[in-house]
């Protein structure tokens, strides 16, 4: 916008400065009480008429004043802004003649400063229109020179309300994305539903400028909701309080499962006050996969305080809180299931027949993870793909948020894949093994991971300790997965410039595979739990490296199903060695 304005002004300045002194005197004579005799009336008047037509065609208001601040020329847009129908009625006047005293003095001071310093003056100011709406104007004033002498000032006023509104809308959207990102970070960092709810409610109240609000979740009793977060001067409401689920506006929203913005509660027949001064409210159902998990309520003492932006933002927050509630419920369910599994495990030591129940429970949990997590993950990834199609229209910071969403979705997909791999190993363990050449599998593995190591400036080496046959009996897919996990971990936990060495060896009875790295190593106190499911040895160097904690557990299961022996040693700060020994096939 400013570039367009600068081009227009530059063109006008070139025209004005290119006109000789007689044009300046001619312009002054047009506004004088006694015009100066004109030696060439027709040509001068034609030129000035054409100039005034060109100035009137400008979309912006424009004026030109002399050093005494008298208006020498103006266009129709400027005259209309000042309430003049005829431009000639405006010419010859000063700012004091057409503006209120205080405003006139401010404008005159700006003009005098431009003529005194010889520097342009720019300003953006708000203005309240006659209908009560607010507008924004950009003002640009430049000095007019003749023979290096400043002989006046020219001003241009452009209405930038639309641009300003678009900017403010964009900034508001960015602020919303930042707040939502903060809520998402809370959800991803903890399963404490009350912590997330309190954080989200605080953000909602600050963003909407509401005076009070609460978040409540469904209970086993369909008649009541239990409050998990509350802010504001509610006289009879606190955490763990129960609210009626079928009364007032809240009851209506829960029945219809549709959010409502009530600009004036006095006009709503279902409204029942919880706060004396409430005039407007927003009530949002919290839904997870079309399942009602709770509700959010915001209240304010100012009618019509809540607008569409607040309303839409509240809906986005409601969806995220619903996810936090569902995650907490799922975590509780998993904890309960794990408790049952532990109980069944101890019982199987005395009663072998109980083993089937334990296996069925484990299978059910994996199916729950696959159904309840994989389906919504696919939906999230689908929407991410749709947003990527419109990536060029997104703000740079929003594109950053989109990248974070993609990485989180990919990480969740990897967790699900690892969980389901455990089930596949159990299913395939009952199948028959065939004769395999472990050397062929390792060669393929080396070729696959060599580019990854090179990208990290690492040296990846393959050694064969003895020239021999490396034949074994086993499942090729499972063994390749075990080998890939060990090599992938070695590359991932070795800093750039390090070395990873793969080796194959053969004794009379065993084939041995090892992966040695010069990575971060594992502290002694963490090594005992290293092969447990979901356990990760986190140190200052590895805390930011992503992982599921299932890779080494998968390796352990595969090696044991092949009647092999794990090999492991590590020194913190120097590196690690992982591998296994399998029975050789003669």
Image: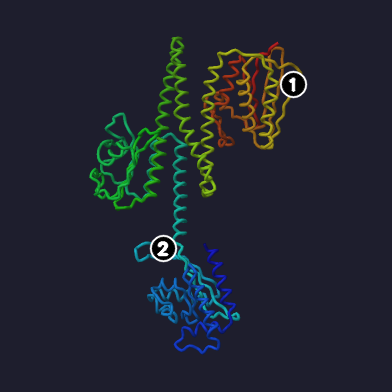
- In percent of width and height, residue 181 lies at 47, 43
Side (left or right) of 411 relative to 199: right
Give the camera-side residue of 525 and 206. 206
Q: Of the residues under marks 2 and 1, which one precedes in the sequence?
A: 2
Q: Which residue is mark 1?
A: 465
> What is the number of the mark on residue 584?
none
Report if residue 199 is visible in the image.
no
Location of mark 2 (residue): 135
Q: Residue furthest front?
A: 42
Please state the total of marks drawn on the protein image: 2
**Element type where label 2 sits in the image:** strand
Examine the image and state in which quarter residue 459 appears: top right
Q: Depth check: 104 or 548 in front?
A: 104
The image quadrant where one finds the C terminus is: top right
Mark closer to the observer (2, 1): 2
List x then y, in percent, for residue 518: 67, 31
Nearer to me, 431 or 12:
12
Q: Nearer the viewer, residue 228 or 2?
A: 2
Q: Is residue 139 above or below residue 179?
A: below
């Amino acid at each position: 916008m400013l570039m367009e304005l600068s081009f227009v002004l530059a063109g006008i300045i070139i025209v004005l400065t290119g006109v000789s002194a007689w044009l300046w005197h001619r312009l002054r004579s047009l506004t004088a009480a006694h015009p100066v005799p004109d030696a060439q009336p027709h040509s001068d008047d034609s030129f000035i008429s054409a100039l005034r037509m060109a100035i009137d065609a400008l979309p912006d208001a424009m004026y030109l004043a002399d050093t005494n601040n008298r208006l020498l020329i103006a266009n129709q847009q400027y005259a209309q802004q000042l309430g003049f129908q005829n431009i000639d009625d405006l010419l010859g006047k000063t700012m004091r003649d057409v503006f209120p005293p205080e405003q006139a003095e401010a404008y005159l001071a700006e003009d005098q400063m431009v003529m005194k310093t010889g520097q342009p003056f720019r300003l953006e100011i708000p203005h309240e229109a006659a209908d009560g709406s607010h507008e924004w104007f950009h003002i640009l004033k430049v000095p007019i020179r003749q023979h290096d002498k400043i002989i006046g000032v020219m001003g241009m006023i452009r209405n930038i309300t639309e641009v300003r509104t678009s900017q403010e809308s964009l900034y508001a959207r960015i602020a919303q994305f930042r707040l939502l990102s903060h809520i998402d970070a809370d959800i991803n960092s903890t399963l404490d539903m009350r912590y997330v709810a309190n954080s989200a409610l605080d953000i909602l109240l600050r963003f909407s400028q509401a005076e009070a609000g609460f978040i409540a979740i469904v209970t086993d009793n369909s008649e009541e909701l239990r409050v998990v977060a509350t802010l504001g001067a509610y006289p009879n409401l606190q955490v763990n309080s129960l609210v009626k689920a079928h009364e007032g506006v809240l009851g209506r929203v829960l029945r219809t499962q549709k959010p409502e913005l009530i600009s004036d509660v006095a006009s709503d027949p279902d409204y029942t006050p919880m706060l004396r001064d409430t005039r407007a409210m927003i009530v949002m159902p919290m839904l997870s996969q079309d399942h009602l998990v709770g509700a959010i309520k915001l209240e304010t003492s100012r009618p019509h305080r809540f607008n569409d932006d607040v309303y839409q933002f509240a809906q986005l927050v409601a969806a995220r809180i619903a996810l936090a509630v569902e995650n907490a419920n799922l975590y509780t369910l998993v904890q309960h299931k794990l408790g049952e599994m532990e109980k069944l495990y101890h019982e199987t030591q005395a009663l072998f027949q109980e083993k089937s129940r334990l296996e069925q429970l484990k299978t059910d949990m994996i199916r729950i993870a696959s159904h309840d997590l994989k389906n919504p993950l696919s939906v999230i990834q689908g929407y991410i793909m749709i947003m990527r199609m419109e990536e060029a229209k997104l703000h740079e910071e929003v594109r950053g948020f989109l990248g974070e969403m993609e990485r989180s979705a990919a990480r969740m997909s990897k967790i699900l894949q690892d969980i389901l791999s455990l089930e596949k190993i159990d299913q395939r363990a009952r199948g028959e093994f065939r004769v395999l050449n472990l050397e062929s599998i390792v060669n393929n593995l080396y070729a696959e991971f060599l580019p990854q190591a090179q990208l990290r400036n690492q040296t990846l080496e393959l050694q064969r300790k003895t020239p021999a046959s490396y034949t074994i009996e086993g499942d090729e897919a499972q063994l390749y997965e075990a080998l890939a996990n060990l090599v992938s971990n070695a590359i991932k936990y070795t800093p750039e410039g390090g070395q990873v060495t793969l080796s194959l060896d053969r004794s009379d009875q065993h084939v041995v595979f090892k992966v040695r790295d010069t990575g971060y190593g594992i502290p002694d106190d963490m090594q005992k739990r290293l092969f447990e499911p979901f356990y990760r040895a986190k140190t200052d160097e590895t805390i930011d490296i992503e992982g599921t904690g299932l890779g080494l557990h998968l390796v352990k299961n595969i090696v044991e199903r092949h009647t092999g022996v794990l090999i492991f040693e590590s020194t913190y700060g120097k590196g690690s060695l992982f591998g296994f020994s399998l029975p050789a096939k003669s």
